[in-house]
Image (cartoon, grey):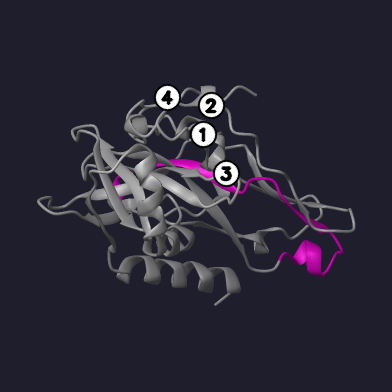
Amino acid sequence: MCAGAFFICTFFLLWYYCPMLTLAAQERNVFGKALKKERKRGSLPAVFYGRTEKATPISVPFADFLKLWKNVGESSVIALEYPGKKDLNVLINDVSFDPVRGEPIHVDFYVVESDRAVEVTVPLEFTGVAPAVKELGGTLVKVLHEVEVSALPKDLPSEILVDISLLTMLTSRILVRDLKLPGGITVLQEQDEIVALVSTTKEEVDVPEKVFDATAIEVEKKGKKEEEGAEGEGKEVSAGGKSSSGGKDPSAKKAPTKK
């Protein structure tokens, strides 16, 4: 079995047998400046909302959230354990950071519906060895680091593997259409977009990710309005350059990015 096939099989086995990720949450009745004390006690202010769920302020353990977020990112469904709510499956939709310390200070969770597709960004994981690099002296150029996909919540992967053993010549390229996708996943980007290629430069190159374009998505203005103003959270910098005034709706259609 080749290295690429081994990595793909391993990924599917882990994905299939992994239990649902869980995160405990509790009701939050603290807002504004009082949130500083909550954070010092190890609680992270948050909110959950969805297409059929009203915005509900909550708090989650900071350490538990940080560990989960770093391990699975924003494309894995999480079972939010909240009193009085069953089957509260969510995605991490928006994370706001302290502009000085760089730590998360607020998170938006979007409640997904099992029969409704969502659109999320999934990171790419490059695996294997490129013959054009090892044997021909070429340089691997990673053009894309993530792709936009649409899928039902149960089908969302935490990452998509890219087998670079397909790069056998100095002219070889891996395109979006060459990606091996799990069942039920649809990539929203152009099929001819380049994922990786081989160059003749001396060092491996990572093409910088595109600057976030806030006009390329629809922003659902729900979430942290109660914190804005009182604590100045409107000035916070959120993940990917998004404003903390509210998260995007993963189930909403995005406007095509201009090229």
Specify which label sits upstream in the sequence, 4 or 1.
4
Residue 233: image location, x then y, percent: 46, 35
- Please name the amino acid that badge 2 sits on: Ala
Say which of marks 1 and 2 sits in front.
Answer: 1
Q: Residue at x 45, y 47 (%)?
A: 105
The residue range painted magenta reads 130-153
Give the secondary structure at mark 2: helix
Mark 1: few, some, or many residues within 10 Å (few <14, many ≥20)?
Answer: some
Residue 171: image location, x then y, percent: 79, 49
Give the secondary structure at mark 4: loop
Rounded to the nearest whole Å, what is the CA distance between mark 1 and mark 3? Answer: 26 Å
Mark 3 sits on what residue? 176
Is there CB contact under 8 Å for labels 1 and 2?
Answer: yes
Q: Residue at x 26, y 47 (%)?
A: 58
Rounded to the nearest whole Å, what is the CA distance between mark 4 and mark 3? Answer: 24 Å
Say which of marks 4 and 3 sits in front.
Answer: 4
Rounded to the nearest whole Å, what is the CA distance between mark 2 and mark 3? Answer: 23 Å
Q: Residue at x 30, y 45 (%)?
A: 152
Say which of marks 4 and 1 sits in front.
Answer: 1
**Quarter where residue 49 is shown:** top left
Residue 218: assigned label: 4
Mark 4: few, some, or many residues within 10 Å (few <14, many ≥20)?
Answer: some
